[in-house]
Image: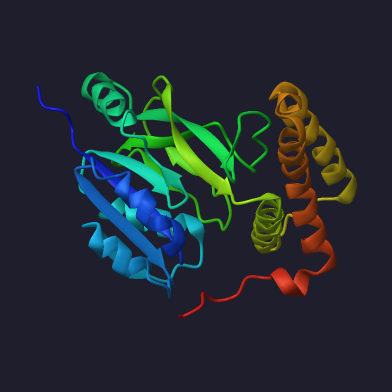
Amino acid sequence: MSTPAISALVVARNEEARLAACLASLRAADELVVVLDRSTDRSAEIAHAHGARVIEGAWALEGERRNAGIAACTGPWVLEIDADEQVPDALWPLMRRTIAATPHSLHPVRIDNYVGEQLVLYGWGGSFGTTTKNILFRKGAKAWRAQRVHPGVDWTGTTGAVIDAVGIRHEVDRDISDMLRRLDSYSSAKAADLLEAGEIGSLPDNVRRFFSRFLKCYVSRQGYKGGGFGFLVSLCAGLFPLLAHLKARLEPERYRAKPPDPG
């Protein structure tokens, strides 16, 4: 029995600095699809050079552009990768053996998170990072919801075992300053979602969420084992919803939804 085909999908915006390494790691895929959202750099040129089918456009919401990418894939299985991720060669045979025999519609894959060249194993969670991602799935099993940052997902079918013998390299942040910039960007997008939904919550509830998320990441997810980086990751995970709430409550005019940039 032949192994089902895998369509590798990358959704990006102005990622010329990291896109080539990502796409090179996807050369074992049966199809390569790259969705570029309002990109103005060399991302399209790089994607074409790697043999990708490139879809360019402008989407207001992250969920919408990801769904457009999934719809463009033609293989029975989709591997959805971000531009700051790379798939090791040793992971491909593991994924192919899994999908050749599985009755399930989804298999999570292990993620190895790097800050610069530092591998940070512990503390990820609270919408600020993860050590597994639901990125290998049957076509038609995954639909993203219409949200700006970390949109929810609707699934069809069952979930199989995590593929964890080899992890995807995720260059999540270049350094600590980059981590803090990401926190600012994520919380700003979340503030816009809260305002659009009319559900910004209360300050006391979000202060409680800060402590509960921090403790979950630092204690339950063993951020304490990661030293200073584990503490920082846990702190950012706790701050994310609190900052989003404060931005939405104190500066709503800055974060109300705007039409997508036509560029």
Measuring from the top left, give residue 68's x and y in whole percent: 35, 58
Taking 61 as reference, is 51 left or right? left
Measuring from the top left, give residue 173's x and y in whole percent: 60, 49
Residue 234 visible in the shown view: yes
Quarter of the image where one finds residue 101: top left
Taking 177 as reference, is 40 left or right? left
Measuring from the top left, give residue 232's x and y in whole percent: 75, 41
Q: Residue furthest left?
A: 1
Comparing 248 with 116, the one in front is: 116
Residue at 29%, 31% in the rendered image: 92
Comparing 103 with 1, the one in front is: 1
Comparing 256 with 216, the one in front is: 216
Taking 124 as reference, is 210 left or right? right
Classify 57 as above or below 163. below
Quarter of the image where one finds residue 167: top left
Q: Residue furthest bottom?
A: 262
Residue 200 visible in the shown view: no
Quarter holding the C terminus? bottom left
Classify 164 as above or below 235. above
Q: Residue furthest right?
A: 204
